[in-house]
Each structure stands twice: as C-alpha cells, then as structure tokens.
Amino acid sequence: MADLNAEVLTLVERALRKDPSLRSKELQKEVAKSHRSVASLSTRQFHARYALQAKKRLAGPRKPSPKVKAPKRSKARSKRRARTGSKTASATASTTPLKKTDPVRALLRERFEERQATLARLMDQAFKRSMDADSLTAVNTLLESVEKQIGELQSS
C-alpha cells in the first residue's frame, strides 16, 4: 500500500469534521498549503490515500448487518422431508416419474425434439458460416464452444 503521512491524514480528518461535504479536490488544495507532497498527487490518488481513509475513521466501526431468519418449518414437513430424503419441492417434482401414457410426457417429448431439431439446424448454420469465412480460427472457436457446452451438459 502507498505510504500514508499521518499528519496529512489528521489534517484531512479535521477538515472533514468541520465540513463533511468537502470534496476531495477542495481537501487536497487545503492540505497542499502545508504539505507540498500532497500537491504532486492526482485528485484520485489523494482521494484513495487520504480522503477515503479519513472518512472510514470518522464513520467508526462497521455495524453488522441484521440477520434475517428463515421462517420455521412445521414438524410434519420436516418429518416428511426426512422420510422422502428430498431437499426441495422442485427436486421432488422433477424426480416424480411420469406414466408412459401421460399426455404431459408426450408434450414434453415433442417439445424436446423441436428444440433438438432447432439446435441441430443452428449448429449446421454456424458451421457453414465458419467454413465460408475460410478461417481455421473461426472453425476452431466454434468447435471449442460446442465442446464446452457438451461438457456442461454432461456434468449436469
């Protein structure tokens, strides 16, 4: 960290006690009258080294933020969770097996196949564009992106 001049810091603190609305540039001008080393600093440097530090000291110690407690769960719910072993309601819903004749299952499958076809079409278009660019870098970038997405899908 940059060297701090304790005397300069004290002067800045005094000035801020008198007028907390003073800007860093004004503070620097005031302190520069008695300390020439401060005049060679940029306003940004002065602000970081002295003005901010003085404001921190004047503010006092930080107060801890209030902790918000989660609402208590009913005993019945806790027992049910322990029995099923599920962590959340969404986890329970996603692991519930669908019946083979369920119309929802058919709709989900149809939606998945549509997305899969769209993805295949977009991949082909991206590959054609990168090949048309006649750049190995473009093709390599596309393949790296695809490999990254495959890795993310395999890990989930």
Image (cartoon, helix red, strand yellow):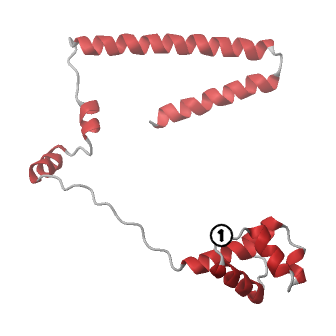
106, 31: nearer the viewer = 31
- Residue 14 falls in which quadrant of the image? bottom right
**Residue at the location (17% across, 47% down)?**
81
- How busy is the neighbourhood of tag 1: few (under 14 within 10 Å), some, or many (20 plus)? few
Percent x, y of residue 57: 60, 80
In the rendered image, residue 123, in percent from the top left (x then y), is placed at: 62, 16
Q: Which residue is mark 1?
A: 21
Q: How far across and down, in percent of the image, does residue 23 sit?
A: 72, 68
The residue nearer to you, when weighing 47 against 153, is 47
Number of dots carrying numbers = 1
Q: What residue is shown at x 50% (from left), y 10% (from top)? A: 117
Q: Residue furthest bottom?
A: 7
Secondary element at image label 1: loop
In this rendering, position of residue 82 left or right of residue 143 = left
Whole-percent x, y for residue 136 in the image: 81, 23
Out of 27 and 40, give the one closest to the viewer: 27
- The image quadrant where one finds the N terminus is bottom right
Query: What's the residue at 56%, 13% (across, down)?
Result: 120
Q: Which residue does the image show at 20% across and 11% down from the upper left?
A: 101
Furthest residue toward left: 76
Dividing the picture into quadrants, the one containing residue 9 is: bottom right
Q: Is residue 104 left or right of residue 42?
A: left
**Location of residue 131 with respect to 149 vertically, above or below:** above
Asked where in the image residue 99 lies, by quadrant, the reply is top left
Q: Is residue 19 left or right of residue 77?
A: right
Nearest to the observer: residue 36 or residue 90: 36
Q: Amino acid at mark 1?
A: Ser
Picture layout, residue 75 above or below residue 150? below
Left or right of 86: which side holds 4?
right
User: What quarter of the picture does the C terminus occupy?
Assistant: top left
